[in-house]
Image: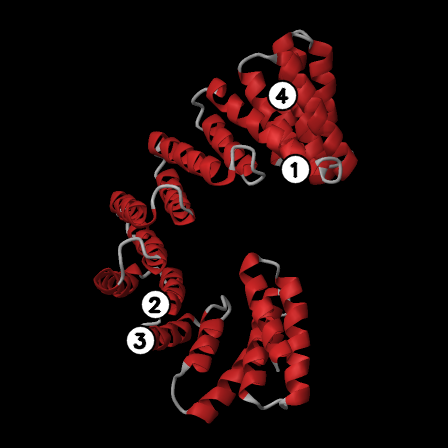
């Protein structure tokens, strides 16, 4: 049974990483072993059976998945007669299903949360409260969730050290509730207190601290607070540089995210370009020739920034690189290819090359029309830009 136990553990490890097809394949092998050696009605078999149901639900077989979970719950209820670890886990599976009746899910969540609180199983309690919060959100009633989560936060603060991972996770739920209730500044303060506690416990250069910065970034973004968001994003980038090294592969995403935020906030392309260039250098070394399509977003972002500062020659080179990647991976009739025609048109407009501007807009319009039709938003925008180009001295 050690083989089956190991396979089930591997499947559960794969599940949160969104590699759910592989998780399902692994769990099915484990289930076959359990059924062969222990029989279909053994507790270990039913635990695996319920998890396979959860994975099937995530892999486009929702009805089969829910049926399997319910069968496993019925088995546990008949066998144990009261809530216990195996039954609580299956209740959580069912409560997390979006198609299930909300009131029934809330009832299950309350039972599970009470059970885990009595057992002081804080990681599982956080999971149950997270599901509970989102179920209350569905019926637009945040007050009960607020009362329960606030009480649990007080419990955690009394029993766990500041900066404990379970307390940090619960603070995310608590801050989300405050945000939904309109208390956005208080929500940011919760994340800020969690950050300070985490730094006090783990130090600045720690993965838990990075998680706290992520939470603050997301919350500040939600209230359109540009300066704090940029500040926290830079702090996060600096920590990852120390933890991983400046040219670590993961940092390319961090630098790109930072640069794109600066561009979207219209706070100066000059500030964004060094981050994009650093991200691109890392990405080039990471993807090489095998996955050149992954470089598309880097070239596109750099081209946009270069257009903003009127470095049109470099902007055109970056646009051509993005265009070739899109053509190679998506073909001519694709949204990304059309976007690069529009980007080229914008460059030629700034350069005063009217013929090329019009030609590229015509190509973009042709693709959008063939993909989405004349009345689509993309086609209408391209048509408007083309009409303006022709009326301002073109054809």
Dot 4 or dot 2: first in sequence order is: 2
Which is in the foreground here, disc 3 or disc 4? 3
| Mark 1 Cα-neighbour bin, 10 Å: few <14, some 14–19, many ≥20 | some
Q: In the structure shown, which secondary structural element does the residue marked by tag 2 occupy?
A: helix
Q: Position of residue 144 (x, y in %)?
A: 27, 65
Q: Residues within 10 Å of mark 3 (few under 14, many from 20)?
A: few
Instruction: Please indicate whether residue 47 sits to the left or right of residue 285 in the image.
Output: left
* Mark 2 neighbour density, 10 Å: few (under 14) some (14–19) many (20 or more): many
Residue wearing tag 2: 122
Disc 3 element: helix
Question: In this view of the protein, can residue 83 be seen by the observer?
Answer: yes
Q: Which secondary structure lies at badge 1? A: helix
Q: Residue at x 58, y 23 (%)?
A: 304
Is label 4 in a helix, a strand or a loop?
A: helix
Front-lying residue, 277 or 365: 277
Mark with earlier residue (4, 1): 1
**Label 4: few (<14), some or many (≥20) within 10 Å?**
many
- Residue at the image point whose x is 55% and y is 84% from the top: 44
Q: Which mark is residue 114?
A: 3
Q: Which residue lies under the disc numbered 4?
A: 385
Determine the CA span between mark 2 and mark 3: 11 Å
Residue 148 place in picture, x, y as percent: 27, 66
């Amino acid at each position: 049974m050690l083989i089956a136990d190991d396979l089930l553990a591997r499947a559960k490890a794969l599940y949160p990483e969104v590699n759910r097809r592989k998780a399902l394949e692994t769990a099915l092998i484990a289930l076959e072993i359990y059924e062969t050696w222990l029989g279909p009605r053994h507790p270990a078999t039913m635990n695996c059976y319920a998890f396979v149901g959860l994975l099937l639900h995530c892999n486009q077989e929702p009805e089969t998945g829910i049926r399997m979970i319910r069968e496993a719950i019925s088995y546990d209820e008949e066998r144990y007669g009261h809530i216990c670890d195996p039954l609580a886990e299956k209740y959580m599976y069912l409560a997390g299903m979006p198609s299930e009746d909300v009131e029934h899910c809330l009832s299950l969540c309350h039972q599970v949360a009470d059970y885990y609180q009595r057992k002081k199983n804080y990681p599982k309690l956080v999971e149950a409260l997270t599901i509970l919060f989102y179920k209350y959100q569905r019926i637009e009633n945040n007050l009960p969730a607020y009362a329960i989560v606030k009480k649990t936060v007080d419990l955690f603060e009394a029993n766990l050290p500041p900066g404990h991972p379970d307390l940090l996770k619960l603070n995310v739920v608590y801050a989300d509730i405050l945000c939904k209730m309109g208390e956005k500044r208080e929500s940011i303060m919760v994340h800020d207190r969690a950050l300070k506690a985490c730094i006090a416990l783990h130090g600045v250069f720690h993965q838990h601290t990075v998680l706290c910065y992520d939470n603050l970034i997301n919350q500040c973004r939600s209230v359109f607070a540009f300066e704090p968001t940029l500040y926290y994003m830079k702090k996060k980038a600096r920590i990852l540089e120390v933890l991983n090294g400046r040219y670590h592969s993961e940092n390319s995403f961090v630098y790109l995210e930072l640069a794109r935020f600066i561009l979207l906030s219209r706070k100066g392309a000059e500030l964004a370009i060094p981050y994009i260039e650093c991200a691109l250098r890392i990405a080039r070394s990471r993807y090489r020739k095998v996955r050149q399509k992954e470089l598309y977003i880097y070239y596109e972002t750099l081209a946009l920034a270069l257009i903003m500062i009127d470095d049109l020659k470099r902007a055109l080179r970056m646009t051509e690189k993005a265009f070739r990647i899109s053509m190679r991976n998506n073909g001519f009739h694709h949204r990304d290819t059309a976007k690069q025609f529009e980007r080229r048109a914008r460059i030629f407009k700034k350069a005063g090359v009217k013929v090329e501007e019009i030609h590229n807009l015509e190509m973009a319009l042709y693709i959008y029309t063939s993909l989405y039709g004349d009345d689509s938003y993309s086609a209408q925008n391209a048509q408007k830009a083309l009409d303006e180009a022709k009326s301002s001295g073109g054809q």
